[in-house]
Amino acid sequence: MLENYLPVLIFIAIGIAFGGFMILMGFLLGPRKPDSEKLSAYECGFEAFEDARMKFDVRYYLVAILFIIFDLEIAFLFPWAIVLRDIGMFGFMSMVLFLGILVIGFIYEWKKGALQWE
Amino acid sequence: MLVELIQSFFAGLGWPWGLPEWMQVGLVILAKIVVILVPLMVCVAYLTYAERKVIGFMQVRIGPNRVGFFGKQMWGLGQPIADAVKLMFKEIILPAGADKLLFLIAPVIAMAPALAAWAVIPFGSEMVLADVDASLLYVLAITSIGVYGIIIAGWASNSKYPFISAMRSAAQIVSYEIAMGFALVGVLMAAGSINLGDIVAAQQGGFWQWFWLPLLPLFVIYFISGVAETNRAPFDVAEGESEIVAGFHVEYSGMPFAVFFLAEYANMILISVLASLLFLGGWLSPLEGLLPESVFEITLLGSLLGPGLHWLVVKTLIFLFFYLWFRATFPRYRYDQIMRLGWKVFIPLTIVWILVVGVMIITGTPPWFDVA
């Protein structure tokens, strides 16, 4: 059972090693002639002004928070979806109730303009 | 069979003593990984070639046609190899303001999941490296790690364009992940299993039994979300070369850039394979149920018309062609349009269709859900 995951683990290790190996090859084969102009941040040829790590729109946070709610919902739906045939009508109706509550929340955030980008 | 092959190989090298068991197991797994990885890398290389050729022809150009092998031009078939070699010999620039360690780790984080997801992809009814019970869940989990690569790249570069791009693509990818997750819930309901092999097995019975028909809206939403997840046109605001130059890989050059590129194309192939497995019956033959059973008994023709890896390859190629076709056809979406499509169109649609599928399963709607 758990030994089925051994190839997965080895594959992840190989994936990481492969990426690392390619970058290492780039370092070994490519030239290295850095100068201050070359190493400065790209800003369409201008001298970079102000810090690049600037303030950003709060809506990105909002999307992240909404994502967590909906992703959790999906996590609840996964096991339910697999056993739906066994739990029948009762299982289906309880999930309709659960989804219904979430849809109310979804409509609320929609009306509040949380999904509005301009 | 593979075990004996490896053992006889080591015996041929003058190693008469048998290998210890853990090394045998490890070598067999390694050999299988190489068997998956090498064709995948070739596919990635030639997908870039196909992209340039297909888009070239769609725009009445010829596309790359110079680089060939052995002094012949051969329609430019040597182009991807030449590109790879060129990138390998390019200088790797580490910007002065960048967080050097994160800057180099980011492409690896983007690529490792794109490769590791292939561990559980079944290529035939018994052809799978790791037959894990929750294989679809594993694919979903590991592919969502890829977004960290983009965020870390945007942050570590310490430059404005990558930073903007990282914010955009993070929000975009998580938004479409919800629509994608809901679409997958529909597949799980229809199949009654989360194992990719079982999902394909549940679609047995010919073209009209495949899940694309009962789950048609989910199928369309899954693939469009897949295009958005991989940051491909028309959802490529993360790259948006006309506004933020090249997005999160502005500061990348040489091999780290190539690794990002590889990850993107490996993800495209992964999404296409998953779409074929989940909705188009994977390796099952579309002729099943149309032709009489006896046709599949004929020695060579039967195995060609019957189920097999070649059908999975054909279906995957169709999806990959759609990727390229989209890029040649559609102008880029505006960011607010992307978010509106993800949140206000796809999520309500998928919730409705999940309920429809639920009713179909409870009532046993023929011809898909009548057998328990």
Image (cartoon, coloured by chain):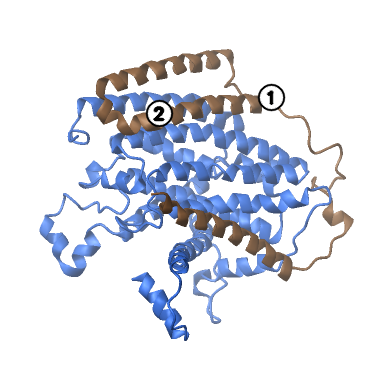
User: Marks 2/1: CA distance?
Assistant: 29 Å
Image coords of residue B214 (percent x, y): 28, 35
The amino acid beneath tag 1 is Val
Query: Residue, x 54% and y 71% (percent of image)?
Result: B78
Neighbour tally class for label 2: few under 14, some 14-19, many 20 plus, Cα within 10 Å: many
Q: Nearer the viewer, residue A26 or B133?
A: B133
Q: Is residue A87 above or below residue B216?
A: above
Quadrant housing residue B333: top right
| Chain B: drawing colour | blue
**Which color is chain A depicted in?**
brown
| B184 vs A7, nearest the viewer | A7
Disc 2, SS: helix
Residue at the location (34% across, 59% down)? B127
Q: Which residue lies at the image location 84% right of the left edge and 51% below the top edge?
A: B96
Q: Relative to residue A81, is residue A43 depicted above or below?
A: below
Residue B151: percent from the left, percent from the top? Answer: 66, 41
Q: Which image quarter holds the C terminus of chain B?
A: top left
Instruction: Find disc 2 in the rendering and name its residue.
Output: A77
Query: Mark on residue B191?
Result: none
Q: Earlier in the sequence, mark 2 or mark 1?
A: 1
In the image, taking residue A31 as reference, residue B335 lies left or right, namely left
Picture layout, residue B43 above or below residue A109: below
